[in-house]
Image: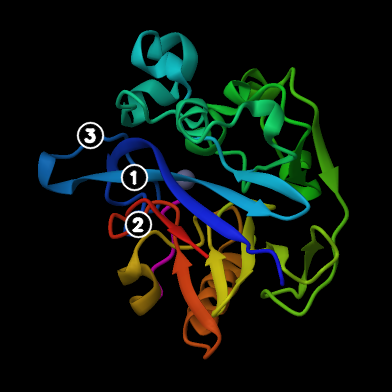
Amino acid sequence: MESQIKVHVMHTGKVKVDRALPYKELDVVPPVHAREEAYRMWLPISSYLIEHPDGNIVVDAGWHEDVRTKAQAHLGAAASFVEYELPAGWSIKEQLAARQLLPSDIDIVIISHLDVDHISGLSLLKGARSFWVSEPELANAKPHKLAWYGELPVQTFTYESIPYGPNKRGRDIFGDGKIYLVDTPGHTPGQLSVLIRLRAGWLLLASDTGYTGRSLEELILPGITTDERQAVQSLQWVKAFSESADCVGVLLNHDPAIVPATYS
Ligand SMILES: [Zn+2]
């Protein structure tokens, strides 16, 4: 009998932002307090635990526990750009512990992209075997981001041709056609989505290619893009994939409609 792949969806923080961040409507996204309350939105931050017969994978790390007590020191300039919350029991480390898992039980930590809400908590996973980020993402990382992962064994991987994605390139992690990293750039230079084969079809973890169901329906780009043409191609591919017959779900990292759950 084939071993079952499971995907656990966790919320590893909340972030309050100006709505121009999820929905591009201004040339420059303002800090959360620049406009009145009606323009602000709370969004969840997601991380994922993928159980595969050949290893455990975590995708993205959410907020570090330091945002509870020393946010200014931990977040730096980002501390005034957004509001943040990490409720008790929500950190990636706490949620793995609740499943009787230590960081050393994690084989690969996938970093979808190097934005603070995805990497702040990375050092909570110290002890994991490896940390993967794409080459274009690491090559374009701003030096201040090193503070969040500088001491971790972060490595890049080489893209291969794969059957999926706007550029048909990515990585078949275990070489069995079950879990693909998919190049979906545009929000950042090397943003990755993760495509997982479950019993009934494909589940796509689409990172920040779009923010909510409305982003997909109306093809609304994220407020921050490093390459708008690539961002459009990535969002269009995610939308088309979501409509394909063997897609069982698309999970956008910050979609308020997503609730923690286990898919198999
Ligand atoms: Zn994000």
Determine whether, in the image, residue 19 is placed left or right of residue 244.
Answer: left
Other residues around mark 3 within 10 Å, as few (<14) / some (14–19) / many (≥20): few
Q: Is residue 174 left or right of residue 260?
A: right
Separation of marks 1 and 3 at Cα, in angstroms: 21 Å
Per the image, the residue denoted by label 1 is 44
Q: Where does the image place residue 100, in percent across and percent down from the top left?
A: 54, 31
Percent coordinates x, y for residue 80 in the rendering: 34, 23
Can residue 186 be seen here? The reply is no
Q: Which mark is residue 121?
A: none
Query: Relative to 96, is 38 above or below?
Result: below
- Residue 155 visible to the viewer: yes
Report the amino acid beneath label 3.
Ala
The tag earlier along the polypeptide, 1 or 3, is 3
The residue where tag 2 is placed is 255
Callout 2–callout 1 Cβ contact below 8 Å: yes
Q: Which residue is mark 3?
A: 34
Left or right for 117, reference 169: left
Q: Amino acid at mark 1?
A: Pro
SS of the residue under disc 1? strand
In the rendered image, residue 6 lying in the magenta stretch gets the answer no
Boundaries of the magenta span: 219-224
Which quadrant of the view contains residue 220? bottom left
Its colouring scheme is rainbow
Classify mark 2: helix, strand or loop: loop
Q: Amino acid at mark 2?
A: Asp
